Image (spheres, rainbow, N blue to C red):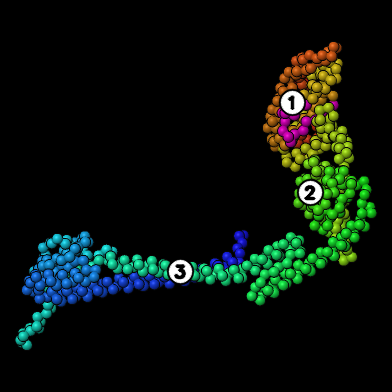
Amino acid sequence: MKQYTIRQYVAWLTLIPLLIMAAGLETFFLHDRSSGLDHDLLERGKLISRQLASSSEYGVFSNNQPFLQNIAQGVLQQPDVRGVIILNAASESLIEAGVFSNTPGNAKADATQATSGLADQSGLPGQIKPTRTGKVKESVNLLTPIYSDGESLWIFQPIISAQVPLDELAASSSAHQVGAVIIEMGWARTNKLKSQMFWLTIGATLLFLMISLYLIYLAGRSITSPIRKLSEAVRLIGEGNLETHVSVPTRVAELSNLIHGINSMAAQLQQESAILHQRMEEETRIAAIAFESQEGMVVTDVKGVILRINSAFTRITGYAAQEAVGQQVRLLKSGHHDVNFYTAMLKSIKQTGIWQGEIWNLRKNGETYPSRVTVTAVEKEDGAITYYVVTLSDITLHKAAENEIKNLAFYDTLTQLPNRRMLMDRLNHAIAASKRSGRYGALMFLDLDNFKSLNDKYGHAVGDFLLIEASRRINSCVREADTVARFGGDEFVVMLNELDVNKAASVAQAGIVAEKIRAVLAEPYMLTLPQQDDTSTAEVHHCTSSIGVALFANHDGSLEDIIKWADMAMYKAKREGRNLIRFYD
């Protein structure tokens, strides 16, 4: 997991709320002021349109265009007003003043239709003739008196005239529309104000954040700088530099107490370490009495650091005292043993105080070797372990002798194939496995045809070469799980494991392997024949084999019976002409 410094934590925990608060307040302020500017423009437009409609009533009624033109020019002097249209009751354009933008569709026709509808209701003419400003059919009318496309704002205001009755007996007066005004106002100045307000707010926010960052930096430095130095001091003490001393001026009481505590702890640890080393040196001198023996000896502390070695250790491992002392004892690890091995070793030492066994160690030159090792824990009166004494001896020659004895006991010295004893052991296991799995196994008895005449004619050296080559060829025909053994003389035995639960299928499988072996053994042999004048000649020799095969399963006979069946089948192959394969039936 990624770790952060205290300064980073302080900075983020302070900045994140500030950023959230600043962003929230800025968003609220900008939204509120933008809405206010939009509302101001709209209300101002409504007021201008109402005033224009009221002022235009006489001019529209009397069709006094110069009068209306003066009024329109006065309106155009107002900020943000771009154009003015004054319509009569017949929706005819009386005045079009100003510079109009592209109108949104049928803007003026919409006003015409709305005016016509009111005119129809009050007995006025209904349709307007189109003018240069276009139509507002679906955008600005009595039902939709306000329309904006983001660049311009169109406001529709009907001109209503009320007749004042002179005769009290006359019918009551009714309001009717005598025309309409449409004004177009631009959003440009409002949008500019919004942009200025936006960047001003951003600048103020950034200035606020920069000031906050600087204050956070100052506060963080006053806290984190002493803590960082304390952390470094603790790390050095943990690495064994007990002479470390912290000197950090600070006004924070808690940090001052912490600095004093760490310095006191380091001094106490330094004192205890000196006492411990003194005791260890005394105990090491005692162990040195029996140190110089024929076995390699190592003294380590509880952490496995080598404190002393003897000359036998140098002779066995190749490490001199100046190279080994101070190093971890694991410099001898060869990699032959896993973690579980060493875990069991330490468990035994803790429980009994001693461990004995064989370990593959590593010499200085990179050579691995077997060694017999004894590890003894030396304890104080209270049972605490102070150091370990390790004795080791090189048992390479002993292991080689064991392997030689094992090789002589279970392998043929000429071909390095399993001998009769190992074959019997593996056959026993194969029979047991066959009983468990229900699968057939097969045993093949092979005899090289006319081998004795070759041996007699050219000598044992040539015969041995042919036996070695024959064993190599047989091995190449079987699986790793199968066994090829030399039974004696020129006789070989091949054991096939785990064939098939069906006998016919097992016979077929065994037959394929047997035929493969028969064919490879029948291939020519290139023999080197010694001559009397100490030279040699090469000669091609042909040697065939007779193979007998016997199957075995969980219900078949004993080990001796199976070998006898295969032997009988082999002799049947010899009687019938040799270079043949016969199954025992």
Question: How far across and how far down the image is residue 79, in percent?
Answer: 24, 70
Q: Which is nearer the N-term, disc 3 or disc 1?
A: 3
Amino acid bearing label 2: Leu
| Residue 341 counted in the magenta span | no
* Residue located beneath label 2 in the image: 331
Of badges 3 and 1, nearer the viewer stands: 3
Mark 1: secondary structure: helix
The answer to whether one can see residue 129 in this image is yes
The answer to whether one can see residue 571 in this image is no
The magenta span reads 471-488
Amino acid bearing label 1: Arg
* Residue located beneath label 1 in the image: 473
**Residue under the point 94% across and 52% down:** 290
State if disc 1 and disc 3 touch (CB < 8 Å).
no
- Of the pair 90 and 553, the residue shown nearer to us: 90
- Report the side of 47 relative to 366 (left or right): left
Of badges 2 and 3, nearer the viewer stands: 3
State if disc 1 and disc 2 touch (CB < 8 Å).
no
Q: Quadrant of the N terminus?
A: bottom right
- Of the pair 525 and 149, the residue shown nearer to us: 149
Question: How far across and how far down the image is residue 481, in percent?
Answer: 74, 36
**Residue under the point 86% across and 43% down:** 316
